[in-house]
Image (cartoon, rainbow, N blue to C red):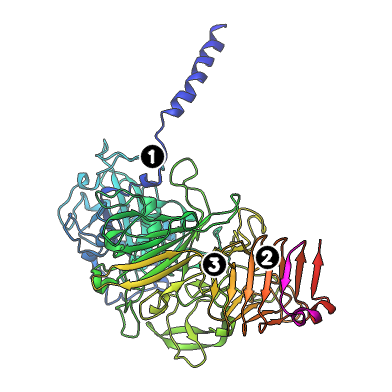
Amino acid sequence: MPRVPVLLLALLLQLPLVAQERPELRSENGWYLSPHGTIRILVLFVEIDFDAKPEKDPQPNGAEHWHKGQLPTWKDRVFDPFPMAVQKADVSRYYQDISLGRYTVLGDYIDTLITLKESEYPGVHQAHSIGMHAVKEANKRGSLRTRHGLTVADFDLWKARGRAGEPKLAGPDDPHSYDHVMVIVRNSGLGHGQGSTDSGSPGELYGFRSDTQSRFGAMNDLPFEILKHEFNHLLIGGNNFHSGGGNAAQFESTFLPLQGGWSMMGASGSSLLTCCAWDRDRMGWMPDGVTHRIRARDRSDREVNADLDPLAGDTGVYVLRDFVTTGDALRIRMPFIPEDQVQQWLWVENHQGSKRNGSPTDRFHWEGINPCVTGVVEPGLFMTMQVGREERVGPSIFNGAADYLRPVLANGNFDLHLRGDTLHNSCPFGTNSLYFVRDPELANPFTGNQEQELPVYDRDGNGKVQRTEHWVPGVRFEQGEPDLDLILFGRPDHAFRMNGVRSIGMCTNPSTANMMTLFSSNTRTSYGTGAPNVRTIHLNGMRVDLLEMRANGDAVVRVSTNDTRMSSDQRWCADSIILPPLRGMDGHSLTVLSGNRLLLDRSRTPTRMSPADSSAGGPWFSDPTRLTIAAGASILVEDHATLELKNNSAVHLMPTSRLVLARKARLCLPEGSRIVVHGDARLEGRAKHFRKARRRGRIINAQ
């Protein structure tokens, strides 16, 4: 009896040692599959013979791209069977480009169509289990026969059961197992653009199981968008990594609106079809011989660290070569966000477009399929904000919420709203598209919608906003401008260009300030409005300028600070805005230049799900704007410039702060709005600026 506790104690003492021997978890090792090296995928092309219920067939006569009873016309465009200097097949080339040559994805297909009779396989109506039926039918052929005569060993290049975040082992299994089996169906319950993937096996195919599997519907064409999206799950992580136009309302997400943009995890809602710099950073995809994790060049063509904290001194002029072919990018840290809230970084990429760099996916989503689609006509800077998701090492690398990337578009943010009518026969497929209004008077750089996201509104009027209550930006209407279609999927004016918007700063739209978040699922918030949410806009004085786009495609970019001078009319809306004690060239934290107006207004774009405020002008799903001038900060409103407050907005001057109105400046402080002076903060200007407002209780002192 005494031996039992001693033996048990010895075993328990060994457990920590075993745990310590496990490899360090790193995102660059991938989730179920490694994003490095070479993998080869076995593809089965399948159709269903609805012999029992022919009325259930969604495509009884086939289509031009995939005739009934035949393999699809694009069968050789999915994967290349062997490595090439420049891959030709669509998916193989995609992975070669986004990985900078670090990941080679090959494939081959069984050389005959797999036909599933409904009467024999009644389970074919369960779309996501169709792989199991396809394998059973394929096994009737006796042995594996692929288009290029490959064997099971050619599809078994990695050991099975690789753990998430741990290094994956190259080499064959014993017995063999296919690394990945992919089923593509012509006419099933999986409509075009639908599919799924997992780490399971559809069963033994010619005597061998698979490590991972996927299945896709392909009624319209090669299902490129959903195919890459689902396969990328196996590299990046689960549904909480949906981003870049690949998310859905039911998944917990970082922002109230669903995001578009560009990312490996993009799908039907993407703009650009290539990856983003965050993807490459997470996957560890870098060129040979580089020193820095995030890098650019200086004007002497030397590599420099491009992970920047401008307020700590990381300013200057940087050269960004083409992002797709070199991986160059800038990442700029947003300052002043409290540590218990999600940190944010602005990414800057130079996209030359497919016509210049030759990469087939460095283009807008529908570019090239119809002359009505405007493509990337001019190279430019594409920017996106990373929110959280900085964990690349350790046990939490697969945690977090979806839509952690939000595009920052050169044409700004606005309180966008529907016009109430529909364009029929719209570009490019002749479908219906909603008109929406972009009103320059409703510019809203801090809390407005940008055109690569799905704005939300209280569609059913129940006093709550749900994330499914959204609309797709289709046709842009702006007074005095031509109507423009297909907005969500990318437009030239979304990029910062030499012939368009070239700068982003504290006083521009869009702004270099951080973004407000609202972690939420479809119907409820995850943390209310508390941490880790960021619910305050922190003005920071940072600026990014595109100085030059060289003939060879290199972008010359300046990153600077102390950009505190407002040289155009601005409308600022946010539940909370803080102006810290920045020091611009004139010594002030913010200067409204002569001839310009700063309007503090209430956001008509929702910043919360509920409750609705039905006060005048409502219903509102935002708080009145509050601008806090922090201790030591100062605002100067120059002669012939205006500071206006509207819709119950407020300015709070904290102790030692100053609001200075020049002799001929104008202050508009209507009923409901107010200025609150705390402690020894000072209002400076002519007495007439403040006398009437004080008498009406619109300027008050708070001790």
Q: Residues within 10 Å of mark 2 (few under 14, many from 20)?
A: many
Residue 546 placement: quadrant: bottom left
Between 460 and 101, the residue placed more toward the observer is: 101
Q: Please tell me whether mark 3 sits on a helix, a strand or a loop.
A: loop
Quarter of the image with the C terminus is bottom right
Lower position in the chain sequence, tag 3 or tag 1:
1
Q: Please tell me whether mark 1 sits on a helix, a strand or a loop.
A: loop
Q: Which residue shows up at 32% across the image and 77% down it?
A: 378
Lower position in the chain sequence, tag 1 or tag 2:
1
**Of the residues tagged 2 and 3, which is closer to the observer?**
3
Q: Is residue 62 above or below residue 1?
A: below
Q: Which mark is residue 338?
A: none
Q: CA distance from mark 1 to mark 2?
A: 47 Å
Q: Which mark is residue 584?
A: 3
Q: Residues within 10 Å of mark 1 (few under 14, many from 20)?
A: many
**Of the residues tagged 3 and 1, which is closer to the observer?**
3
- Amino acid type of the residue tagged 1 in the rendering: Glu
Judge whether residue 259 can be spotted in this image.
yes
Q: Is residue 398 above or below residue 109?
A: above
As drawn, is 591 to the left or to the right of 53?
Answer: right
Read off the magenta span.
Answer: 680-691
Residue 410 forms part of the magenta stretch: no
Q: Position of residue 690 (x, y in %)?
A: 77, 78
- Amino acid type of the residue tagged 2 in the rendering: Thr
Q: CA distance from mark 3 to mark 1?
A: 48 Å
Q: Which residue shows up at 31% across the image and 76% down it?
A: 61
What residue sits right under mark 1 in the picture?
166
Q: Is residue 639 above or below residue 525?
A: below
Q: Is residue 375 above or below residue 623?
A: below
Q: Please tell me whether mark 2 sits on a helix, a strand or a loop.
A: strand
